[in-house]
């Protein structure tokens, strides 16, 4: 398994990474919109200003680290994960990852609803670079763990959202990535499944290279992470122990300011 | 350019898997299944045959076998049309996938290209069977694979350009549909190249798709080859378009996932 191949260097290394987007208002997807933009530019001298989602972000993560990421909505947490996953290209700086990266950014990440559950297991595995043979050895475990049984050969569009979530989660666990990126997807399935996920996740953590977890569930961050990043306005404003970062976060956006509480709908 | 092909090669398993699934899914839940892939171009051949041969009595312009000529031309053009139209949505339609996992968009374009090849396999096999039964193969037939490869490279280059640009201008899909409907009459698909008046032939063959179809006709039928200058220009155009397509891809690549 890849996750067992440890490395001495950093698994993830970001150096002065900036990511910019064009605002939806400034995007021209049709010829008419392009024409409108041209007119605004020529007649009114309008120059679209890009939105900077990440500003000169630098950090490194090593094997064995479990890093929590907290911060307000729109602060750049998900953009940071997507940049590490290679989904967004940085406009400045460099991103270097070593090993197999698996990103679970939403339920049913990378699923094709027209394909069967079994096909989607192969599809997901192949997207992170596993061979068909490697995936085939994991299929039975995934089916059993996700509890989808005979539905595994039905098209995914006939699954309930809980089943899709369980299948996503089971695939992520089975793939044993070197770098695991998780964005707020922990309230998956019913109580029995959550308990099962919790145990499996704990077991996997011991084997995973390193893990980045975005969550507003501060108790989860406290319990599961060895380090925490506070991402605000596209910058890492604090990189320290979870307790320190959570304290700063609560001071900035605590009760009466942003309504942050430390309740946890589930604990992993 | 090599970097993109390296990625495609590394992801061959994935490309094969997805293309096969999409090929199977295209006929899923229909009464005639994959026969639809054959019936649609066949209906087009029927219309042209009726118009040109039955109604206007111009069968002499095809030489010995108008049906074989029309089948070969229309079935090859069906591949061109399908490959370009599916390429136009190959990146756009996988927006959700691209936003969740790291996949080089060029892999999705390659998948749609392979799916188009699979979809065209049945019509082309039928055309080959009819040609084998009714045609009169000569030594020129040995050049057919080279002509087909030229067509494939040309369409791949155009597909990559179309796939990238459609993300930034959605109108391109509709413009492309119109262009493809006009292009069939600007290429020797439903008529042989000899039908073009000699003074206009050089200009006519400036269109690389027309030139490659003239080359295919030359390898399969008793038609004149495109002039050497036009052939040289064709290969220069194919090389240039391949280079351009990768330049466009690299230029647009950083914004492909950011501009959905």
Image (cartoon, rainbow, N blue to C red):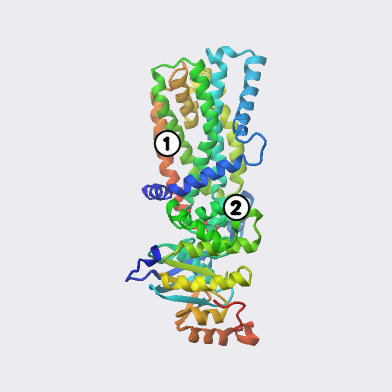
For label 2, count other residues whose C-alpha is less than 10 Å away and answer few (under 14), some (14-19) or many (20+): some
Foreground residue among B152 and A183: A183
SS for callout 1: helix
Distance in Å between CA atoms under marks 1 and 2: 30 Å
Residue B86, image quadrant: top right
Residue at (47, 53) in percent of width and height: A136
Point out residue A123 in the picture as x, y percentages from the top left corner. 51, 53
Foreground residue among B87 and A31: B87
Q: Which mark is residue A34?
A: 2
C-beta proximity under 8 Å, tags 1 and 2: no
Q: Is residue B123 above or below residue A89?
A: above
Q: Nearer the viewer, mark 1 or mark 2?
A: 1
Host chain of mark 2? A
User: What residue does disc 1 label?
Assistant: B238
Q: Is residue A23 shown to the viewer in this render?
A: no
Q: Is residue A234 above or below residue B34?
A: below
Q: Which mark is residue A216?
A: none
Residue at (45, 75) in percent of width and height: A66
- Left of B239 or right of it: where is A223? right
């Amino acid at each position: 398994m890849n996750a067992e191949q440890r490395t001495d260097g950093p698994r993830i290394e970001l150096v002065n990474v900036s990511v910019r987007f064009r605002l939806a208002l400034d995007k021209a997807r049709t010829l008419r919109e392009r024409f409108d933009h041209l007119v605004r530019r020529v007649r009114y001298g309008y120059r679209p200003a890009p939105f900077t989602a990440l500003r000169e972000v630098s950090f490194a993560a090593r094997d064995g680290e479990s890093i929590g990421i907290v911060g307000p909505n729109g602060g750049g947490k998900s953009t940071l994960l997507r940049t590490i996953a290679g989904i967004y290209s940085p406009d400045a700086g460099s991103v270097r990852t070593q090993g197999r990266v698996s990103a679970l950014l939403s339920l049913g990440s990378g699923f094709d609803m027209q394909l069967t559950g079994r096909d989607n297991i192969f599809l997901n595995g192949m997207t992170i670079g596993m061979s068909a043979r490697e995936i085939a050895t994991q299929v039975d475990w995934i089916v059993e763990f996700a509890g989808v049984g005979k539905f595994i050969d039905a098209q995914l569009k006939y699954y309930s959202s809980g089943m899709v979530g369980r299948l996503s989660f089971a695939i992520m666990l089975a793939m044993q990535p070197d770098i695991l990126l998780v964005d707020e997807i922990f309230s998956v399935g019913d109580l029995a499944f959550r308990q099962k996920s919790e145990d499996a996740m704990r077991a996997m953590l011991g084997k995973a290279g390193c893990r980045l977890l975005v969550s507003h569930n501060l108790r989860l961050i406290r319990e599961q992470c060895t380090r925490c990043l506070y991402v605000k306005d596209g910058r890492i404003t604090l990189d320290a122990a979870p307790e320190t970062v959570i304290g700063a976060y609560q001071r900035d956006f605590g009760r009466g300011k942003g309504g942050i509480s430390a309740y946890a709908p589930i604990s992993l | 350019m090599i970097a993109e092909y390296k990625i495609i090669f590394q992801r061959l398993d994935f490309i094969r898997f997805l293309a096969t699934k999409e090929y199977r899914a295209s006929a899923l839940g229909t009464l005639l299944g994959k026969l639809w892939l054959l019936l649609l171009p066949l209906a087009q051949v029927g219309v042209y045959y009726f118009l040109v041969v039955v109604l206007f009595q111009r069968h002499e312009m095809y030489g010995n076998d108008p049906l074989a000529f029309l089948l070969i031309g229309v079935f090859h053009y069906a591949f061109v049309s399908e490959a370009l139209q599916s390429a136009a949505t190959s990146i756009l339609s996988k927006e959700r996938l691209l936003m969740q996992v790291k996949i080089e968009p060029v892999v999705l374009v390659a998948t749609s290209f392979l799916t188009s090849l699979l979809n065209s396999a049945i019509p082309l096999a039928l055309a080959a069977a009819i040609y084998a039964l009714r045609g009169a193969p000569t030594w020129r037939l040995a050049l057919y694979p080279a002509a087909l490869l030229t067509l494939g490279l040309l369409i791949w280059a155009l597909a990559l350009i179309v796939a990238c640009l459609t993300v930034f201008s959605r109108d391109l899909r509709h413009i492309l549909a119109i262009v493809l409907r006009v292009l069939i009459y600007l290429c020797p698909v439903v008529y042989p190249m000899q039908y073009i008046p000699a003074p206009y032939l050089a200009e006519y063959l400036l269109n690389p798709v027309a030139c490659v179809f003239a080359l295919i006709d030359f390898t399969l039928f008793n038609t004149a080859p495109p002039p050497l200058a036009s052939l040289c220009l064709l290969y220069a155009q194919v090389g240039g378009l391949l280079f351009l397509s990768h330049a466009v891809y690299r230029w647009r690549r950083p914004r492909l996932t950011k501009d959905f």
